[in-house]
Image (cartoon, rainbow, N blue to C red):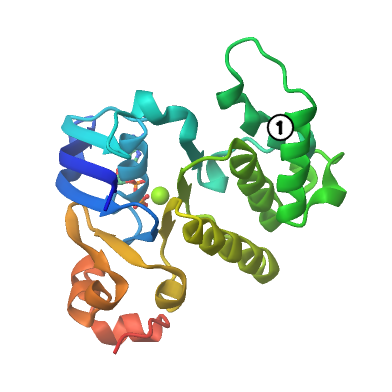
Amino acid sequence: MKTSLEIKNLTVSYSNKIALTDVNFSMETGKLIGIIGPNGSGKSTLMKAVLNLTAKDSGEVQINEKSLEEVRENIAYIPQRSNIDWDFPILVRDTVLLGTYPKLGLFKRPKAKEKKMAEEALKKVGMEDFSDKQIGELSGGQQQRVFLARSLAQDADVFFMDEPFVGIDIHSEEIIINILKELRDQGKTLFVIHHDLTKVEDYFDELILVNKELVATGAVYDVFTPELMERTFNTPLTVLENMGGKLS
Ligand code: ADP
Ligand code: MG
């Protein structure tokens, strides 16, 4: 089996406050993986450290058994929606076309082939009628689908998505999760930050449980247990059950 992500001795802090301590794990390729943990537990920090978007105190990261630099064009990252500037004036079609740039090479312009890839990606997420709209005019779910389309146009191998299901409609959520499962079935690897415990068993193959350190990783049926959820959320099981977690 090939390794999609290997992390060794990762520690990250922000101005002396430690966000993640000594994280070590490795995951296989071809999995749909949930990164689960409470607010402020270091989920986004983990993703950003892997992608070199935040400084590490220590740690080594390999993606698909290579350095980030070697695989960068095959990595798609969809940040948390709240961190995107929605007033930036850009059309939906151009947002998706940007996905084709990493593989185009320096100073090359997208041509018919890239435009077709972008068009197909928009169709795939059900947003082809919105090509000429400004990204800021869309609903949360529509924006999230457009960003997924951009990653599809990139034809990435490894996807990193930060809370893609927060603040979106159920129709968009269904479209997105079905595409993520399809990508997994094609052998791609997807890391998805998520905090709704009700969907965990339906959505993910494997989990990475985070609470300022690594609590556990493994197949959902091994690690989605009352004990590990209590440790991850520092919350008694009865409260978690009331939050809707289907923990047996
Ligand atoms: P999560 O995504 O699990 O909610 P984060 O990774 O965003 O958690 O944050 C982990 C901790 O690091 C939190 O205490 C947060 O306040 C802190 N933090 C995150 N980003 C920064 C930053 N840029 N500067 C300072 N502290 C930060
Ligand atoms: Mg976060």
Residue under pointer 1: 97
- Secondary element under disc 1, as helix, strand or loop, is helix
Residue at point 41% right, 73% down?
200
Task: Tell me where residue 67 sits by quadrant.
Answer: top left
Give the image location of residue 163, x and y in percent. 48, 55
Q: Position of residue 58 (x, y in %)?
A: 15, 31
Split into quadrants, the picture shows ligand 1 in the one at top left
Of residues 230 and 172, the one drawn nearer to the viewer in this rendering:
172
Q: Horizontally, is 202 left or right of 151 in the view?
A: left
Q: Image quarter for residue 147?
A: top right
Quadrant the C terminus occupies: bottom left
| Quadrant in the rendering for residue 158 | top left
Residue 181 vs 220, above or below: the answer is above
How far from the left and from the top, in percent, is residue 80?
51, 46
- Binning the other alpha carbons within 10 Å of mark 1 as few (below 14), some (14 to 19) or many (20 upward) gives many
Q: What is the three-letter code of the residue carrying label 1?
A: Leu
| Residue at image point 70% right, 30% down | 88
Identify which residue, 108 or 220, lies in the foreground: 108
Q: Could you tell me residue 108's position as x and y percent?
A: 67, 13
Q: Give 4 or 22, whichever is nearer the viewer.
A: 4
Compared with 102, 188 (above or below) is below
Kindly tell me whether residue 235 is visible in this rendering.
Answer: no
Relative placement, left or right, of 95 versus 212 is right
Q: Is residue 199 above or below residue 1?
A: below
Q: Residue at x 40, y 77 (%)?
A: 201
